[in-house]
Amino acid sequence: MKITIGLIGDYDPAVTAHVAIPKALQRSADRLGSSLAIEWLATPAVSTRHSNFHAFDAFWCVPASPYADTDGALAAIRFAREQGKPFLGTCGGFQHALLEYAQTVLGMADAAHAETDPDAVTLLVSRLSCSLVEKSGIVRFPAGSAMAAIHQSSEANETYHCNYGLNPAYEAKLFAEGQLSVAARDEAGEIRALQLPTHPFFFATLYQPERSALKGERHPLIDAFVAAAAH
């Protein structure tokens, strides 16, 4: 079986995550005995690719934002969400999955990212009180959650490379309707992963599980993502 995955983002070989992601995907595909094809979907070109998106089995919105074209990244995330395509967003992908959901589903048209629009009224994604660049820490999964089942554990130790996350002032509004759910919190109680439970597979993490591949390891969440793409 061949799995085709679109990587939403602007490839840069100097970005650790961009080097790690293909390796992580290959490890998980090898586990299934599947062949793997990946394609980088540069954000400025996304608007011309919509008609071809159905050719992909899954999408991963990768780290290293701001993207060259924010609207392109959001359009690709929206396609994956609305079409039921397996989706994983990490770091910048987590931040932009939040933006897409808030803007499109909740009607928060002015929801913005502090990195690209620091003077916006509705800063959904704001600068973290403490930088998480090259930091690691424990994240905990809700009891009985899909994330706990995927990891077969109530917690994991994960690595970050980010300065921005969900503005806590908007947490209640984002999760009030019950479509979006918290998939992980750190030890201080801050949201570090999210899920759309009604979607076949839609997860986003502020941390970077792909870095497991640089240590020669597979990651449970990436295994689950690739398995979802194979179905």
Image: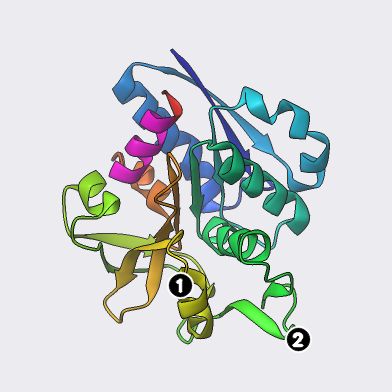
Q: Is residue 121 above or below residue 193?
A: below
Tell me how far mark 1 sits from mark 2, CA to CA: 26 Å
Q: Secondary structure at mark 1?
A: loop
- What is the number of the mark on residue 176? 1
Q: Secondary structure at mark 2?
A: loop
Q: Amino acid at mark 2?
A: Asp
- In depth, the one of 70 and 121 nearer the eye is 121
Residue at the image point whose x is 74% and y is 74% from the top? 110
Residue at the image point whose x is 60% and y is 43% from the top? 82
Disc 1 crowd rating (10 Å Cα; few below 14, some 14-19, many 20+) is few
Relative to 157, 191 lies left or right: right
Q: Quadrant of residue 59?
A: top right
Magenta-colored span: 220-228
Q: Is residue 217 above or below residue 71?
A: above
Quadrant showing the N terminus = top left
Disc 2 crowd rating (10 Å Cα; few below 14, some 14-19, many 20+) is few
Q: Quadrant of residue 120?
A: bottom right
Q: Residue 171: x and y, percent? A: 47, 77
Asked whether residue 12 is in view, the answer is: no
Which residue of the protein is positioned furthest toward the top in this rendering?
A: 1
Relative to 123, 26 lies left or right: left
Mark 2 = which residue?
A: 119
- In depth, the one of 36 and 184 nearer the eye is 184
